[in-house]
Image: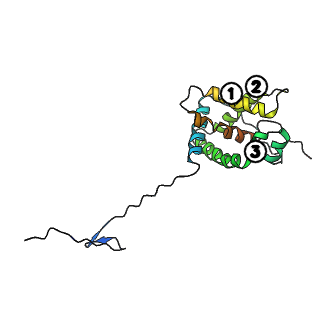
């Protein structure tokens, strides 16, 4: 009579009953910023749908910190959560780099799009926070027919901050 039971033992050399076995280890890494990354990329891709070609733009080489620009423009909305904005600035920069691989002019087009919105809303009577709110509202309006949900759209502020930090919208502090 045959014994139908099997005793299988395995060791650290990946052998069981004299046969090689393959180990498959699956690690699920949930990044804290995965929602931000996903939403920011969606926003950037949607913005790229309605950007136009632009000419070469001279880079701003003036030396000052983002913090000084925030203070100079009295942007309390940015000042309160500066560290969070800076963390997401890097995400926006990385996503722009990825999109620019297929559309090299993307960053310039996006900046021009936001500068146009800024210029439309730059009202001497409004304070900087009101102008910032209008910019975000206009971008949300432009994205109204997109498949972005409200949670995705909440990341628009970080894309606007990126353009602000690149010194393309709002006033630059005077040089000393």
Q: Earlier in the sequence, mark 3 or mark 1?
A: 3
Q: Position of residue 63 (x, y in %)?
A: 83, 48
Q: Residue 39: which quarter of the image? A: top right
Query: In 3D space, how far apart are the residues under numbered discs 1 and 2 (Cα atoms)?
Result: 10 Å
For residue 28, side relative to residue 16 (left or right): right
Task: Note whether 56 is above or below 1 in the view shown.
Answer: above
Q: Position of residue 35 (x, y in %)?
A: 56, 44
Query: In 3D space, how far apart are the residues under numbered discs 3 and 1 (Cα atoms)?
Result: 23 Å
CB-based contact (under 8 Å), mark 3 and mark 2: no
x 75%, y 30%: residue: 118
For residue 145, side relative to residue 24 (left or right): right
Task: Note whether 51 is above or below 59 in the view shown.
Answer: above
Is residue 172 visible from the viewing direction of this image?
A: no
**Numbered label attached to residue 120:** 2
Q: Position of residue 153 (x, y in %)?
A: 61, 35
Would you name the residue on which mark 1 appears?
138
Q: Counting other residues with Cα less than 10 Å from the Cα at mark 2, is it few (<14), some (14-19), or many (20 or more)?
A: few
Q: Counting other residues with Cα less than 10 Å from the Cα at mark 3, is it few (<14), some (14-19), or many (20 or more)?
A: few
CB-based contact (under 8 Å), mark 1 and mark 2: yes
What is the residue that sits farthest to the left in this orientation? 1
x 53%, y 31%: residue: 147
Residue mark closest to the camera, 1 vs 2: 1
What is the residue that sits farthest to the right in this orientation? 176
């Amino acid at each position: 009579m045959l014994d139908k039971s099997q005793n299988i033992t395995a060791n650290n050399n990946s052998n069981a009953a004299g046969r090689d076995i393959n180990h498959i280890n699956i690690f699920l890494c949930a990044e804290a910023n995965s929602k931000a990354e996903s939403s920011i990329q969606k926003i950037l891709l949607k913005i790229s749908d309605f950007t136009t070609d632009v000419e070469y733009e001279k880079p701003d080489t003036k030396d000052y910190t983002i913090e000084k620009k925030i203070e100079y423009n009295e942007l309390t909305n940015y000042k309160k959560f500066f560290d969070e904005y800076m963390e997401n600035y890097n995400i926006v920069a990385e996503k722009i780099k990825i999109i620019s691989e297929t559309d090299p002019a993307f960053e310039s087009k996006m900046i021009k799009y936001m500068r146009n919105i800024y210029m439309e809303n730059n009202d001497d009577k409004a304070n900087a926070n009101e102008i910032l709110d209008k910019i975000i509202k206009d971008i949300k309006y432009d994205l109204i027919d997109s498949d972005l949900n409200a949670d995705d759209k909440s990341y628009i502020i970080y894309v606007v901050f990126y353009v602000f930090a690149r010194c393309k919208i709002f006033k630059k502090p005077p040089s000393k």
